[in-house]
Amino acid sequence: MKRRTFVKQLAMSAAVAAIGFGSGSLYAQGKTIKVGVLHSLSGTMAISETVLKDVTLMAIEQINAKGGVLGMKLEPVVVDPASNWPLFAEKARQLLTQDKVAVTFGCWTSVSRKSVLPVFEELNGLLFYPVQYEGEELSKNVFYTGAAPNQQAIPAVEYLMSKEGGGAKRWVLLGTDYVYPRTTNKILRAFLKAKGVADKDIDEKYTPFGHSDYQTIVADVKKFAAGGKTAVVSTINGDSNVPFYKELGNQGLKATDVPVVAFSVGEEELRGVDTKPLVGHLAAWNYFMSQKNPTNDAWKKEWAAYAKKMKLAGADKPLTNDPMEAAWIGIHMWKQAVEKAKSTDVDKVIAAMGGQTFKAPSGITSTMDAKNHHLHKAVFIGEVQANGQFNVVWQTKGPVKAAPWSPFIAGNDKKKDEPDGKTIITK
Amino acid sequence: MRILLAGLSWWIASSALALDAGTVNRLGFGDGDEKIAAIAALVAEGDPAAAALLQAAADGELQTSGKRVFIVKGEEALDAATGARVAPLPEDREDVIFNNRVRRELGGAVAALRLISPDRAARLAAARELTGNADEAMLPLIKKALERETDASVKQLLELTQATLELRTGSKESRIGAIRTLGLSTNPNTKMLLLAILEKSKDGSFSEPDEDLRIEAQKSLRELEARLAWGERAGVLFTSVSLGSVLLLAALGLAITYGLMGVINMAHGELIMVGAYTTYVVQNLFKRTEFFDWYPLAAVPASFLAAALVGMALERLVIRWLYGRPLETLLATWGISLMLIQTVRTIFGAANVQVENPAFMSGGIELFTGVVMPWSRICIIAFAALVLFLMYFLLTKTRLGLFVRGVTQNRAMASCVGVPTARVDTWAFGLGSGIAGLAGCALSQIDNVGPNLGQNYIVDSFMVVVLGGVGQLAGTVYAALGLGFANKLLEAWQGAVLAKIAVLVFIIFFIQKRPQGMFALKGRAQDA
């Protein structure tokens, strides 16, 4: 086991050094603002994170084309932490101390965010985190542009409980074994219990990162489903989703019998999976590519053109998804805040971030909460279609304010809805 | 003839279409409840026009524009209510969206209407669809179908469906009959129905007041559970063999390079990866042709050759100079594994690449109701058996096999009797590497193909070879299947994370007790 990590680290650091060096030397040392991009470009999370790097670079290119920020061009510094959590912290430190970036856009898994958090707090950096997560954290140095549990997980489960969603009575909580699925499932279990679901009707299951043999799990779900109307809540992350969905399709577990709602599966993860047997399985997000509105249409067109120009992998079938939208919102809000503060100084930008608005591709105007560093977001639930896209079958009336401290975890009612000068973190 | 027939059916469909406009509009524009009511109304009408509309809805051919609902087939469209042909097609059409709940009703409705089809296969499929999916509105249709049904298997399924529907209503005798019929089912969903009869409400009283019925239900439930338990055991057996075959494939090549030749080959995983990437390349070559489903036929030899060539080059250039120096071999092959990973990353990129399964490898066959064996897994089990057989044949029945065994058992003696030992080493190493490539080809069908693919299998491969006993082909087979069973049984009991840990702990203890593995070579050969 040890050898494996060591091999990985060695290989990755070589790769990363090459990439970091390449992009650093591209730009002259003129009047630029350095911006860090910290996403895994290799390893198990690369399937999800690579496009976030690309969409951030596209935003930077567009901003530069329109004259940059405060009259200065943005200069991206791309590093590859290679799905290796300790390496995330190392790379973050490098970005902050050596490259002296004004802001960093990055991370997907919560374990990577937890890994870099102390670094950003110690060096007073600024991180924009674009992915839905489990809450239970509020740092003055981080802006969370993805969903908190009440903006994704809870509405999804409520939908599946409703008559329209199939009226599920039994629940399989299935996830990858790390902090996000564990915490989300803790919240969901408390929520389900509050709704009167008994412990015997909840089955919690975890698999390691990169797990690829889902035969037993799918068979177990089938068996569990024989005891009553069942729904599966999947917090499986990374490339394990491909074998998981393949197995679902092969074993003929149909959405009309046992719907699977996923919180980390979007258009990008389903690329290359035959979705015909998966029609009707669900995902809960704050954005779907299939949404029809002028902002989204324009954004999709820009992305397709950019992917083609940069010859990105998958440019023949350009896809957008929720974390990409969140990353897009994040970088634009940061730009607006810098312009409002007239400085890239971290404390001034943080002060200027509260109340920023941005017309998001999801069709709503996203607002950064005045206090709690989270976005107000609308929640959509979509069903997979045969073409790999999602059809929105349910949505909230309007934007929902994020509750990073879930009321379903004991003791959270006493916590403040805004970060102190220093972070409050519970385990 | 076929064109004529198609034209005829189109004509019949279009001329017969004349449905209640209100129902059609509810299906096209209503919310969930209204759509379901519309479907029920269409089923009740039961005529060919309604069936055609429901079928079109199930196939996703319904579109709306303004206040009209269309059935759109390719370039042609019909007005869903009147059956009139629509031309030109309106531009602003939108798909009618059905969610899971509506789709479920729709599936049941289409199946119920198909019960009167003259084609036996269609009736059987419809009856099967209905077993878990019927509602009371369909009871008259099912009864009618049962009366005229002649086929035994369709009849059995329909009786089961009828039993589930009559469970709630009907007289005591018919309900007891229904419960008994349910006891004969193999469908896990029927368990739910029986459980509902036995359910206790909150104040401790039974929801079903009649005790006779409850006793009957208890009996049926026990029968059903016994039958389902067998299905479950068969399922565990299958998944264990399947995991065992994956482990076996991954380890077979190593059984030659490490087991027979004694080379600690840390690049073994990367040879698997080379095979997987070769499959990817071959798949891409076939992508634009109509023979896509046949690409494995080309990918199998190609991945064998690619990995074998890499392996032979490796042996010639590096390992040859390090025979008898295990530590240096270990370091050198490890370095090579890093180089191979980096090379692949430079050529194909760091992200995973997609290897699509050929059509015949998706889906599965249903052994019992609820126990499905996916074709991809079946193919891999068969493939592993085939590779094992070929390897056995090669090692025991051919001249090369004889040489390999001779050289590995006593190099000096083999050399004395004229065996070209150096060349045999290269061939043997190439063979082991090629088999690793075959493993990569198979794994690409079920796992993600990325530069790190090999890293995920190298530990497992060494585990299998060491556990089985170094130098023993049979040991490798037993160890792979044994680990497959241990892993799957533990996983069913304790979850995937703990199963993995438990298996590792078990191996540590086993190796301490029996350092030579399950099977040890006996006699002088051991020291050679």
Image (spheres, helix red, strand yellow):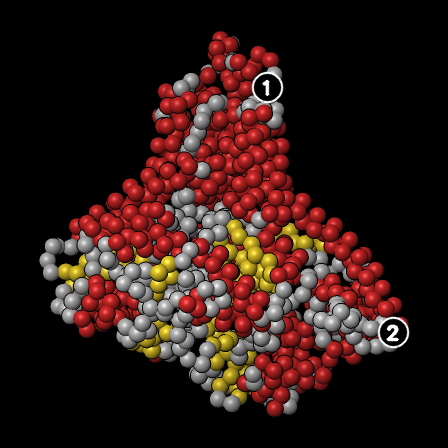
From the viewer's perspective, tell me whether residue A355 is left or right of residue B386. left
Q: Which residue is mark 2?
A: B172
Whether callout 1 and callout 2 share a subunit is answered yes
From the viewer's perspective, tell me whether residue A55 is left or right of residue B423. left
Q: What residue do we see at 52% from left, 33% from top?
A: B463
**Which quadrant of the rendered structure holds the N terminus of chain A?**
top left
Callout 2, which amino acid? Lys
The chain carrying label 2 is: B
The chain carrying label 1 is: B
Callout 1, which amino acid? Leu
Q: In the depicted view, which residue is nearer to us: A44 or A368? A: A368
Q: Quadrant of residue B99?
A: bottom right
Tell me residue B323's x, y (percent).
41, 19
Q: Nearer the viewer, mark 1 or mark 2?
A: 2
Mark 1 / mark 2, whichever is N-terminal? 2
Answer above or below: position of B490 versus B425. below
Tell me residue A248's x, y (percent).
57, 58
Q: Which residue is mark 1?
A: B521
Tell me residue A374's x, y (percent).
35, 69
Q: Residues within 10 Å of mark 1 (few under 14, many from 20)?
A: some
* Dot label at residue A95: none
From the viewer's perspective, tell me whether residue A378 is left or right of residue A212. left
Q: In the depicted view, which residue is nearer to us: B3 or B526? A: B526
- Mark 1 lies on a secondary structure that is loop
Q: In the depicted view, which residue is nearer to us: B15 or A286? A: A286
For the residues labelled 1 and 2, say whether their Cβ atoms are less than 8 Å apart: no
Determine the residue located farthest toward the left in the rendered image: A30
From the viewer's perspective, tell me whether residue B389 is left or right of residue A100. right
